[in-house]
Image (tube, grey):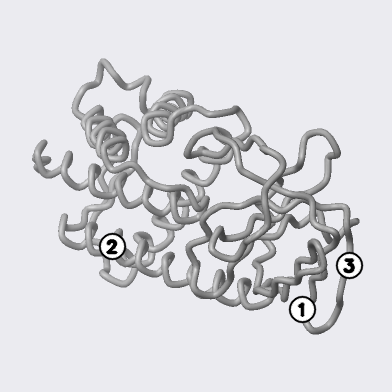
Amino acid sequence: MIIYVDVLFVINFFITYLLLLLTCLITKQSKKQIRLLFASALGGLYSLVILADSLSFLITAVGKLIVSIFIVLIAFGFVRISLFIKNTVIFYFSNLIFLGVITAVCYISDVRGITVNNSTVYFDISASTLLLSAGAAYILSVIIIKLHNRTLGKAEIYSLTIFKNEQQIHMFAFLDSGNKLKEPFSDYPVVIVDESKITFETERMIPYNTVAGEGVLRAFKPDKIIISNGKKSLETDRVYVAVSSVDDKNFSAILNSEILNI
């Protein structure tokens, strides 16, 4: 089988890029295109090791793990160890999804041959078929994730009422399992509300740390809040309300999931 270096690089660059996009989608991280492109370039270069017997150690499980770690680090950087491990695991999970779809296409397409080089198995399929398979895997994954998020989102939209100084503000709020923000002194959970909804004066600054960076949010202590999803209702004053931008047409606030455990 004739192997064209440029075609091999482009195919693996494209597939690595789709894998990283899928990783971003699953982990709900904002993507930085320049970092993804550099990481994809490493994925493309890594595919060329099949042409160099002297680099066969990179084909081993340890070698593949090292390369994938570098790909994840280039694409997402390093914020904390738990996030890095999560990104790496999801990246491998994305690989499994793509492998499943591409293998299915190989069976459907009646693959005529298999090539083994440097202890690595390669299906003898055309570049166009491989790229179309990878594209189909990505599109299918995006559709499933969006349908799942839409179903989950509908189940986790709550009615929120904030009480302060004999005033009430009503809105819809999303219960976000990823929102772990707490007021550092009281350890009370924090509700993030769109700034356009709040007219009360803020009295506290609450630090936050996300994948996008660090900062502080203006916040205040409400007299109480009431949240309800139609089936159950909860009233508490052991909470803080932080003001930020909530860019979503379906809700104006983001609830900390620990509020339900108060």
Q: Nearer the viewer, mark 2 or mark 3?
A: 3
Identify residue type, mark 2: Gly
Q: Tell me the distance, in whole angstroms, between the alpha carbons under discs 1 and 2.
A: 38 Å
Q: Which x, y percent locates residue 137?
A: 36, 63
Position of 67 relative to 167 (above/below)? above
Give whichever of discs 1 and 2 has the lower sequence position.
2
Residue shown at 68%/38% (left/top)?
206
Q: Tell me the distance, in whole angstroms, between the alpha carbons under discs 1 and 3.
A: 12 Å
Figure quadrant of residue 149? bottom right
Quarter of the C terminus within the rendering: bottom right
Q: Pointer 2: what residue?
A: 135
Q: Sort mark 1 into few (<14), some (14-19) or many (20+) by Cα contacts within 10 Å.
A: some
Query: Is 123 displayed left or right of 145 in the figure?
Result: left
Q: Are marks 1 and 2 in contact (CB under 8 Å)?
A: no
Does dot 3 land on a helix, a strand or a loop? strand
Q: Pointer 3: what residue?
A: 235
| Viewer-side residue, 226 vs 209 | 226
Give whichever of discs 2 and 3 has the lower sequence position.
2
Q: Nearer the viewer, mark 1 or mark 2?
A: 1
Identify residue type, mark 3: Glu
Position of 210 relative to 15 (above/below)? above
Identify residue type, mark 1: Asn
Q: Sort mark 3 into few (<14), some (14-19) or many (20+) by Cα contacts within 10 Å.
A: some
Residue shown at 50%/55% (left/top)?
26
Which of the labelled discs sits on residue 229, or is there none? 1
| Viewer-side residue, 68 vs 28 | 28
